[in-house]
Amino acid sequence: MRSGAVRHILAKFRLLPRKELARPEERRVVRGRTRRQLLALVVLIVMASLSGQPLAMAPAKAKLFPDPDQIPYQIPLRWCALKGTKAVTDPGFFGAPNTTSVLLGRQLRASNQIWTPRAKITFRSPFPADVPPSAATFPVIDDPRPPAAGLGSTLESEQGTGPGQHGDILLPDSPVAAAEFEEARAECEEEWDHMAQPPPAGLGISMKGPIALNFGRFVDASGNPTSVGGLGLPPTSHTITGAIDPNFPPWCETPPDRVTAVEGAFMGVVDFSAVGDIVRDAQVVGHELGHVLELGHGDGVDNDGDIKYDGFCDRGPPAMGGEDGLNGGGGGTNPPPTIMHPSGISNDVTALQRGTSRGIAKVTPGSQIDPPIELVNADTLSDRRVDDAHDVKAASVDMTAVGMTINAEREQVILSHTLFGLVSKDESTEYAAFLDLDSDPTTGGRPAELGFPTRFKGAELVTRVRVQGSKIRSIHPGQLGEGRTATPTAWRFEGGAFSDVRKSGVTASVSSPVGEELPFPTFDVVSAELPADVVGHVGSQVRLQAITAGKGKDWVDVLPGEKPSRVVPAGSAVLFMTPLRFPACTTIPEVVQQPGDVVTLKAAGFHPGEAVHVILGDEPIVTEELNGAGNMSTDVAIPEETRGVHPITIQVEDSALTADCVLQIRGGEGGTASSSAAVSATAGPTVTATALSTSGGPPLVGPGTLVASLTVMAASVGALVVLLRRGVS
Ligand SMILES: [Zn+2]
């Protein structure tokens, strides 16, 4: 879409007779209530199945989408921008009114160009409907190791200074060098966690979804920018219980049907100003999001016919039985390139990559499926609370997060402790969680009765996992215990006493997510997996306390709070075990027969009276006003040159509060973005600037300023742009 074309549509739009709003409004109120009842029913079904009744959510979804391949998924991303990056210091450089719009624009382009048309996965804002628009902004965080104090970043004595400019991150090419990147990730998740605090400290709402970082550059130890454009780490996968074949773990199966939940995925990308153009930016962000969806580097094809494909899942040169190798050798760089080519120089997603990414999407935290004008929670319900990194010295007992995930269909509940470091040789550690499942301290038991040094009261469930460390020798696909053992115990409070339920199918695991872009383990996730009927009823809020212990059984880290004295006080954190409720939208009809047709766009679930931008693909096409009920209905003519599948985003002005839906325009497959991508992927800096001048339009992508600035940049740092082009990872 071109800005000229957009102006053309706007002109055309004003000539269009607006449909009379009253009648559709009334109908929507009725439909809204029906939808809420449906949602309530789904919640009831979840609870019923957790109470041991064999009800599952599957029939409801089967009715909405007879073909599971057609289910559209929406995954919220929790962004943070580092202080000192262009997105923070000068959002106007990108023609955006604020940092939030710059970041939203980046994920929108990755959805529009790659993930929505090619896998029916749309990355969306993480803010649900009940967040006030003024509070729906992405956090700006300190550079964990700035070159010096300034630009708002403070120097933390333990962490010290780092190389490069403000906002830059040391390239994590070794476990030691990974510290700054890990600190930034932890800091970002902490910021999001604060929002779950009750007002006035927070919003009292727990946002979910993978973490996405916007930082300056990856720099070497001398502060020189590297060619690496981003880093994506696969999530930690939880599976149905049973032995895992290290050569073919469940997350390498296509589709990964035995994966019941994932958590802790995160990715970081260099600032948009360091990428070059909007087509390339979508690829850089889209590539890292591919890693978040468990994809490895490669051509997305099973070249050697062993069912496994790409990256870590089918590693090693062909002589070793693999096809791809660590850095994309073998099939990794085979033509035609895919979005998971090590340089991410394509938009394409193969059938195998689609199978993997969609299988992971449905169990990603916060994931929703998108029937018209509503959203239904996908397969998992989860929440996790964050604990400060570095609040205890030993990284193997330094908790950074504790989470709970319910997969009602698979009848599994997972409790996990995420650590800052690894449980290594000669270490023997313990991780315990006390859960007040009905959020009522007057029911349930005192874990002290089981010998835990805590004053916590009202626990219906207590879990403990003991881990025996060992030397970490090799790199396995994705994650594995690396020879460490994890032993679970679980107690359920019933009939006035705790009973040991470990023999009821409770399992435990210790694993460290490893990707190709961080090809060594840096931290562990210690989990207990329990059958849902052992856990029993889980309320909408769960009170949680978690503690860890190292050698000598001194309990050292506690969530919430700091290092305790001898006995941990009764404090607790809250897990919100309810689906997020986002504003929703739809188009009538849902499929447009040809460009130029007019569709009615409806959105609901917003705060009343706000101005909203309607964005088709990544182009704002019109600004509208929400009515007194927080709804909107407007007619939009589809631009002449628009084809394929595109996300539609209704964005409250200056806010990340959005409704997201998908529109299909017949007459083409991939949409306009892909054709320009093919040209731009091989283009030099001059062509890059030209490509920019043919797109744009406020507020997400700037017109004049961006083009001018980037033209200058292209000339002065042309070599760097070329380098960036060569390596995403
Ligand atoms: Zn990569």
Image (cartoon, helix red, strand yellow):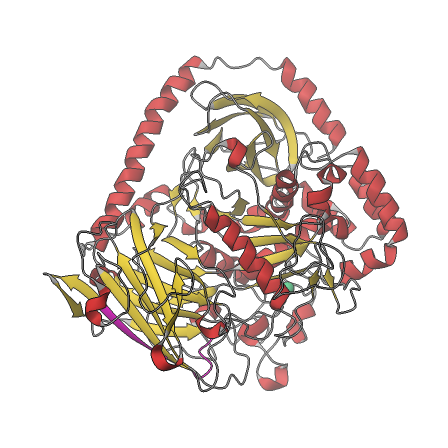
Q: Which of 335 and 207 is in front in this view?
A: 207
From what the image shows, is residue 101 above or below residue 12? below
Residue drawn at 33 percent across, 59 percent down: 545
Name which quarter of the figure residue 491 lies in. Answer: bottom left
Q: Can residue 649 be seen in this view?
A: yes
Magenta stretch in the rendered image: 479-490
Left or right, 307 with reference to 492: right
Q: Nearer the viewer, residue 349 or 373?
A: 373
Count of number-bearing discs: 0
Quadrant holding the C terminus: bottom right
Left or right, 423 with reference to 462: right
From what the image shows, is residue 581 above or below residue 73? above
Q: Is residue 350 visible?
A: no
Q: Which of 43 and 426 is in front in this view?
A: 426
Quadrant holding the N terminus: top right
Left or right, 81 with reference to 41: right
> Most extreme residue toward the front, as rendered?
565
* Magenta span contains residue 239: no
> Most extreme residue toward the right, as rendered?
715
* Magenta span contains residue 487: yes
Percent x, y for residue 391?
49, 65
Residue drawn at 21 percent across, 61 percent down: 533
Percent x, y for residue 488?
30, 74
Name which quarter of the figure residue 562 lies in. Answer: bottom left
Quarter holding ligand 1:
bottom right
Percent x, y for residue 328?
66, 72
From what the image shows, is residue 103 above or below residue 309? above
Percent x, y for residue 150?
72, 51
From what the image shows, is residue 221 above or below residue 10? below
> Most extreme residue toward the left, as rendered?
495
